[in-house]
Amino acid sequence: MISPVNPPEPDGPEDGHRAEQAALRERISADSLTTRRDYLRIVATVSGGLAVGSAVVSAGVLHRHGDGIAAPLKVADRLESGQAVSFDYPGEDDRAMAIRLPDGTLVGYSTVCTHLACGVLWRRDQGVDGDLYCPCHEGKFDARTGAVTAGPPPRPLPKVVMVEDARGAVWAIGTARSGEDEQAGLCRGLRDRNPALADAAGCPTRKSGK
């Protein structure tokens, strides 16, 4: 019968200290190898995901805000200066925001960044009107116009056309694609659906026979 073999006892405190150091070095070496492998795997995964995401967005495969037509949607009973409200429009997966700028101007935008579709936030404390900010890659947009002011976004934010009715309620009544004139985007379908709202938004009246 074979008896278990025990490791030799250290001769003294100094030998014990050396043994502990050797064991610690082995653990650190193993941990470092695992960390390096995990790091390379994570980098490869993230880089690949960003590359695929960028290609998909550039190719126009993902749904772009402003495509399609939706019925008017009331988003707030009232919106005071310096306030904002988030909502989904024109579809349930289309994130959007209405903002009442400090001077009373009412604006609306898609809050899907035109870079890689991260969520965009309104930062009230940035400048006179605040700014629209994408935290993923430091993208910035002008809160008054939706134009790109910093970072990698290639296009302005698509607009959501907002109006205020006689009671002060705020409505989303149409969308415009990135870079498209607000009126042109709105009037693509609104005139036929709701002439009164089309008039409120300033849509030109169609000439007879057109």
Image (cartoon, rainbow, N blue to C red):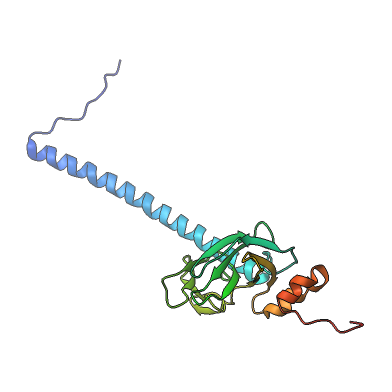
Question: Image point 42% across, 52% down: which residue?
Answer: 38
Question: Image point 14% across, 42% down: which residue?
Answer: 18
The reply to whether residue 112 is in sight is no
Q: Is residue 32 left or right of residue 158?
A: left
Question: Image point 64% across, 79% down: which residue?
Answer: 179
167 vs 36: above or below: below
Q: Nearer the viewer, residue 203 or 91?
A: 203
Question: Where does residue 158 sit, x and y in percent of width and height?
Answer: 63, 73
Q: Quadrant of residue 56?
A: bottom right
- Extreme residue in the top direction: 1
- How many labels, in total? 0
Question: Where does residue 13 sit, x and y in percent of width and height?
Answer: 8, 37
Q: Is residue 203 left or right of residue 56?
A: right
Q: Nearer the viewer, residue 73 or 165?
A: 165
Q: Nearer the viewer, residue 66 or 10?
A: 66
Question: Where does residue 20 sit, x and y in percent of width and height?
Answer: 18, 40
Question: Image point 46% across, 60% down: which residue?
Answer: 43
